[in-house]
Amino acid sequence: MKKLTGLLCLGLMMAACSKYADRSVDNPQYEVSNNDILYFNKVVTTDSSTVLYGTAKFRPNYWIQFAESLYIEADGVKYPIVKADSIALGEKIWMPESGMKDFVLTFGPVPASVDKIDFAEGTPEGWSVWGIDLTGKADYRSVPAGVPAELRTAAAFEIVPEPVLKSDSTIVNIHLQGYRPEMGATASYYVNSIDGQTSADDAVTIDPEGNATVRLMLYGPARFVFMGQEQAFGFGVTLAPGEDVDVYADTRYRAQVRNVPEGETFKPYDYIWSNGHYAEADRQRNLN
């Protein structure tokens, strides 16, 4: 009986241990961030904790503040902050002359099945970083599955098309790939055209699937720039009067630009796909 009990206890212990995994990822990739202040240098997971090692970058002699309601989230489960080292939550943190402040945040353990986590302050307009990779193998430069196959082939479009010069309405159908409602339900835009620069009088509504529509009156080629809240994501495309264009944009791109390891040079890649008149011209512009 004692032997059976011992084997049962051993089995339960092994099952508990297998639920978690010891992992350490340096300079983890992340999908989207709504700020240029927080950078995570390492993430470590064990059977007792999830630890984020980070650096805050801000103007020297100015202050920042971390909310006491910090948490990470994985597969719909929130893990509140357990401990903060090198910073005091809920208090002003004055930046040194270097403009950089290291910190360590400890949360509860996440299951081994989790391959990415989200970080959030848990306050309105608070800092958020979505899709922090726990595997060290994430490829956030891959083409999102939602982009139609026919828009991925550059050869289908003319690089330098004839300009369209007329007065007509244009419809921009926006499809944000990787969008989540918590990234913000509204966005803004501006347009550079022969009339100068104009901007939206009202915020553009984004539906829960990441779709939005903008209607414009144009008189010639125009540059349309769309920006999410806190510039967490954004893109720019060239429009022609009279077109009804679909634009697919990868929300992860800006984070990849921000998250280039020190000493390395960012290499542009495709992150916008459209069926517009100037689609290939835009693509060449983005890659150079």
Image: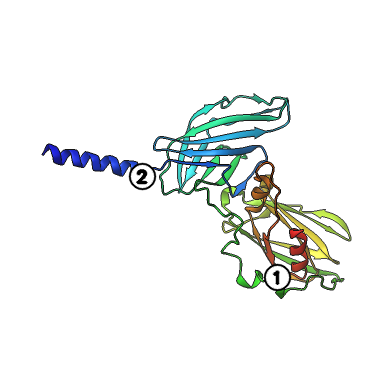
Q: Position of residue 81 (x, y in %)?
A: 49, 33
Task: Please determine whether, in this image, residue 157 is positioned above or below residue 30.
Answer: below
Q: In the rendered image, which quarter contains the N terminus? A: top left
Disc 1 to disc 2: CB gap under 8 Å: no
Which badge, 1 or 2, is on the more N-terminal residue? Answer: 2
- Residue at the spot of label 2: 19
Residue type at tag 1:
Ala
Residue type at tag 2:
Lys
Secondary element at image label 2: loop
Q: Would you call the spot at circle 2 few (<14 residues within 10 Å), some (14-19), or many (20 or more)?
A: few
**Camera-side residue: 114 or 124?**
114
Q: Where is residue 278 in the image (x, y as percent from the top left)?
A: 78, 68
Label 1 – label 2 distance at C-alpha? 45 Å
Q: Residue at x 24, y 43 (%)?
A: 11
Q: Residue furthest front?
A: 263
Say which mark, if any, is on residue 82: none
Task: Please determine whether, in this image, residue 30 is positioned above or below residue 152.
Answer: above
Answer with left or right where residue 62 lies relative to residue 196: left
Q: Where is residue 43 in the image (x, y as percent from the top left)?
A: 52, 39
- Residue at the spot of label 1: 154
Q: Residue furthest bottom?
A: 156
Answer with left or right where residue 7 lies relative to residue 150: left
**Camera-side residue: 91 or 147?**
147
